[in-house]
Image (tube, grey):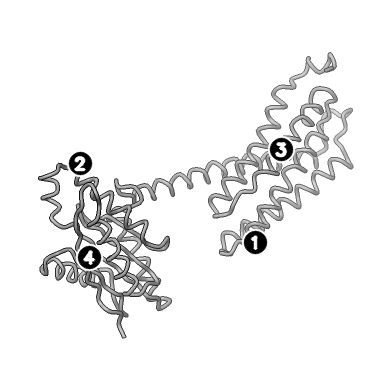
Amino acid sequence: MLSRSAWHEDWLPIVMADISVLLANYAFYVGFCLTMGLRPRLGWIQALFGLSLPVLLYFTTVQPNASLRWSVIVLVTAPMHLLLAAQAIRHRDFLLARKLLAFIEFVTGIGALQQGFDLLLRPMSEQSPGPTPAQTVAMFLLLSHACGVALCGFMAAYARLAVQADQYALQDAIPGVLNRKGIERRLDECIEDAHRHTNRLVIAMIDLDHFKQVNDHHGHAAGDAALAYLARTLTRRLRSSDAVGRFGGDEFLIVMPNARASFARHVLEAVRMEVRGRPDLPFTISCGGAVAEKGDTAETLLKRADENLYRVKHSGRDGVSVEACPS
């Protein structure tokens, strides 16, 4: 049972402040993991924080002790900072930002452990009118760190939302397909990567034959269904490293890094045969592919793919033309 004197003290604001410090550190950890591309280890952190809450409540209401309260908070959050430092160091892409984060979090974690044990060994005097100057400085630094990490957590969450918004802006109305801006960005990245590492790169332009007639004879809903069916077929047939984007109204662009012309031709033929055999409303497609050569830009590569596409169209449509790999 709680002591009578405990109820007369301002225990609720104290408990809320302690919880806020823990939540600020938790938000910092999750936010920085998301920002730095790390995988949050939430299970044991949530358990540790959860177990500390009744301890904090006990040392606030039943047996008030500021030193033990702060030592619990510091010793609970210290392993979190050390874990974040270890995750940043062990990440496969050890960038400068992660090096700096690892150093800061390691120093913070060690400092938190030292401060926590110092409060246990040399607690603040309950008889004195206030803490010593050294303890005041320590408390100020801890509160400053809590405010700082809370702000960092909110900034990291905002950065995550900004990245998601940017990704959403590159998506087409058809699920799983990039819009023109998105597929052009992916093409530029793959061309730069192909030139830097001398990797293979194949692109293909795909056009739905007589799309206007499909809309005129069967309605726009049927045309939209045909585009969605073609997009699903492409994404199912392609590899996870490939990208599909809607380049125009009924035109798609495929970017296939580290692929041979034979692979692209095989995939496009399989897609062409599948859409022809669609049971409810079959349709045909024309495909033109190009293989990246040394010195190619997005413009020159698209131009050759477009030329192969129109070569198929002038030959009667419903076909695939992919240029051979350069010798």
Dot 3 or dot 1: first in sequence order is 3
- Report the residue at 22% width, 68% height from top: 320
Residue 296, located in which quarter of the rendered image? bottom left
The residue nearer to you, when weighing 306 against 260, is: 260
From the image, tell me which residue sits under label 1.
89
Label 2, label 4: how many angstroms apart (C-alpha)?
24 Å
Q: Looking at the picture, does residue 301 appear above or below residue 164?
A: below
For badge 4, the amino acid type reads Cys
At a point 25% along the width and 61% down the height, the residue shown is 273
Residue type at mark 1 is Ile
Circle 3 — which element? Answer: helix
Q: Quadrant of the N terminus?
A: top right
Residue at left offset 31%, top offset 75%: 292
> In which quarter of the view is residue 37 placed?
bottom right
Q: Which residue is mark 2?
A: 221
Disc 3 crowd rating (10 Å Cα; few below 14, some 14-19, many 20+) is some
Q: Is residue 116 left or right of residue 147?
A: right
**Residue bearing mark 3:** 49
